[in-house]
Amino acid sequence: MKAIVFDFGGVMTTSTMPQRVMAKCEELNIDFELIRLGFLKYRLQYDGGFISLKEMYEKIFADNSIALSEESFSAILEADRASWLYRNERTLEWMKSLKGEGYKIGILTNMAPDFAPLFKEHFADFIALADAMVISGEEHMYKPNREIYDLLCERIGLEAGELLFIDDVLTNIVGARRAGWKGIRFISNEQVECDFRHELWK
């Protein structure tokens, strides 16, 4: 194992869902379950850069006959963006430790191009540790499709079997394994660090 590759949401962040959107929906008397189901339907299109955040929510609201004022609609969009800025400082410290031990660091994330500037601003110290990075929306591809894992391999200059992927979404870990990588699902910092140590002894 020569490189550890990290997902963004739920790994570098402490939030795995747009929590501020949940609060805004409650304030506007919108059933968040409808939004969650809309994410399942449209979020990969957004993360792949095929639709904008505004277009994704327009589709979700249209599907559910939800009408909002321009002000409320804008508030939902801002709440979505802000929901992904909760930093997981323990992940940052672990990344630094792994880098110090000689591992290459990668970042592989499903992320829309319109959020990428915020990511690069608020998580610059995470990004500075990376030897290679792939942001789905900038490449018009997304996990768990094989091509995005292969692109990270190419950029980091290693064979698939030399990489270990850490992601909070099981289907993305399955995708990594199908691409020849090792993978550990992130549930908590304590768990993933323990599972990593066990992986080293295999």
Image (tube, rainbow, N blue to C red):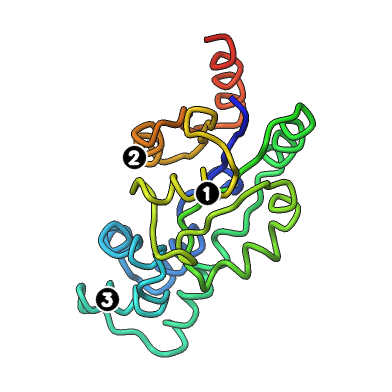
* Residue 179 placement, left or right of 118: left
Q: Earlier in the sequence, mark 2 or mark 1?
A: 1
Circle 3: is it few (<14), some (14-19), or many (20+) Cα within 10 Å? some
Residue 97: percent from left, percent from top? 76, 31
Question: Residue at (51%, 34%) from the top-left corner?
Answer: 159
The numbered mark at residue 34 is none
Residue type pointed to by label 3: Lys
Q: Which residue is mark 2?
A: 171
Marks 2 and 1 sit apart, C-alpha to C-alpha, by 14 Å
| Residue beneath the point at 48% across and 39% down | 167
Give the alpha-carbon distance from disc 3 to disc 2, as whole Å: 24 Å
- Read off the residue under disc 3: 59
Instruction: Tell me, yes or no, whether the two marked residues, 2 and 1, touch with CB atoms within 8 Å.
Output: no
Q: Earlier in the sequence, mark 3 or mark 2?
A: 3
Q: Residues within 10 Å of mark 2 (few under 14, many from 20)?
A: some
- Determine which residue is flagged by label 1: 108
Which of the two discs, 1 and 3, sits closer to the camera? 1
